[in-house]
Image: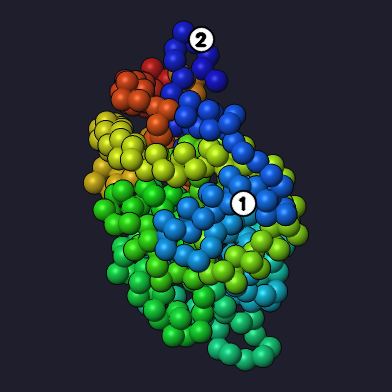
Amino acid sequence: MATNPEEPIVDLRSDTFTKPTPAMRRAMAEAEVGDDVYGEDPTVNRLQERAAEIFGREAALFVPSGSMGNLLAIRTHARPTNEVICDAWSHVSLYELGSMCTIAGCLPRTTRAPRGILTWDIIEPLIREKVYYDSATTLVTLENTHNMHGGVVYPQEIADDVCDKAHAAGLKVHLDGARIFNASVASGHSVADMTRKFDSVMFCLSKGLGAPVGSMLVGSRDFIAEARIGRKLLGGGMRQAGVLAAAGLVALEESPKILHIDHQNARRLAEGVAQIKGVSLDPKNVVTNIVMLDVKGLGQTAEQVCAALEKRGILCQTGAGKYDVRMVTHYDVDRAGIDRAIVVTSEVLGPRARCRSQ
C-alpha cells in the first residue's frame, strides 16, 4: 500500500471494495434463515422474489458471484460445442477463466466492437451456418455497463434491435448486467425496461450496490429452475444464505438511490486527470462510475503508473490494454477522496514529476 503511512488511501481499484453499510450489517445479524438448498431460507426467497419483481421476470436465483451467474446462463442456453458471440473485451471473455470453454464446453466467438457496443451488423456475419459438422451459434452475450470500455451504457435501441434480430435468427441473448443499475441511473430508464427483451440477465449486488457477497440471475421460471440445478452442480448451493441475502435486499432497495453520486465523482475525477499532459481521456465519455485512462503518452505502462500511484496511496488497476488504467468510484470514496486522487495523480504523473524522475 502507501509507503507513507500518514497519507490516506483512496481505493479506486473497483466498486467490489465497498464495505457493507450499517443497515446491511443489522439486516445480516437479524436475518431469518433456513436451508436454501431445500428452498427453505425465507430471506433468500424474499430476495429472489423482489429481484424478479423489479426486473419484471418470473423468477430469480441468488448466486455467489457474477461469474457463476454468467456461466449458469451460458450453460443453460447453450450446449457443449456451441458458439457464444461476445465482445473481445467483455467480462465473459477476459475475466471468467474461460469457464464457458472449460465447464460449459462452449466456444467464445469474439470480435472487437467500438466502445464494446455490438450491433447486429457486427453480430450477423459471425453466425455459423446451420451445418451439422460446424459449431452451432446459439447465444449472444452483451454487457451493460461495459467494464473495460469505461462504464459505457448500451444504447437501448441497439440492445433491443440485437435481441429482436437474434430471436428471429433462433438465438438466445444473455445480458451481463453486473452494473445494470448504474446504466439505469445514467439513462433514466428502469432496469425492467432496459432488459425486457433479453432471455436472461445477471446483475451484481456486490459492486456499486455494496452488498458483501452475491449476484442475481433473472429469467423465466423454467430457465431459473434449470440454472438452480447448475448452481448445485458447480458447488454454489448455499445453506443458511439468508445472512448474505439480507444485505442484498438492503442493497437492492437503497443503493440505487445514491449511485448518481458515484457518477458525479467519476466525472469530476475524469475532468481532473484529463488535464495531465500525456493522459488521453475524454470526460464526456464518462457517464457512470468507471474512468479509463490511456497513459501511453506518458511513456509508461499502466502497470508502472499503478505502482507509482500506489506509493502515494491512490489504488487503481490496469485495464485490458497495456496502457489502460482503470479507476472506479463507489460510495466508500467521498468527494474529498476524489479531490485527493486528482491532486496526487497530477503530482505523480504531471510534467514536473516526469522531469524529477529523469
Tell me where residue 25 appears, x and y as whole percent.
54, 28
Amino acid tagged 2? Pro
The residue singled out by tag 1 in the image is 63
Count of labels shown? 2
Bin the neighbour count of mark 1 within 10 Å (Cα to Cα): few under 14, some 14-19, many 20 and up.
many
Please say if 179 is above or below 110.
Answer: above
Q: Nearer the viewer, mark 2 or mark 1?
A: 1
Amino acid tagged 1? Val
Between the residue at mark 2 and the residue at mark 1, the CA separation in whole angstroms equals 38 Å
Q: Is residue 6 left or right of residue 257?
A: right
322 vs 210, nearest the viewer: 210
Residue occupying image coordinates x 51% and y 10%: 5
Residue occupying image coordinates x 29% and y 69%: 157
Image colouring: rainbow
Q: Quadrant of residue 104?
A: bottom right
Q: Is residue 190 left or right of residue 178?
A: left
Residue occupying image coordinates x 46% and y 8%: 6
Give the mark, 2 or 1, whose residue is nearer the N terminus: 2
Which quadrant does the N terminus fall into?
Answer: top right
Please say if 208 is above or below 1.
Answer: below
The residue singled out by tag 2 in the image is 5
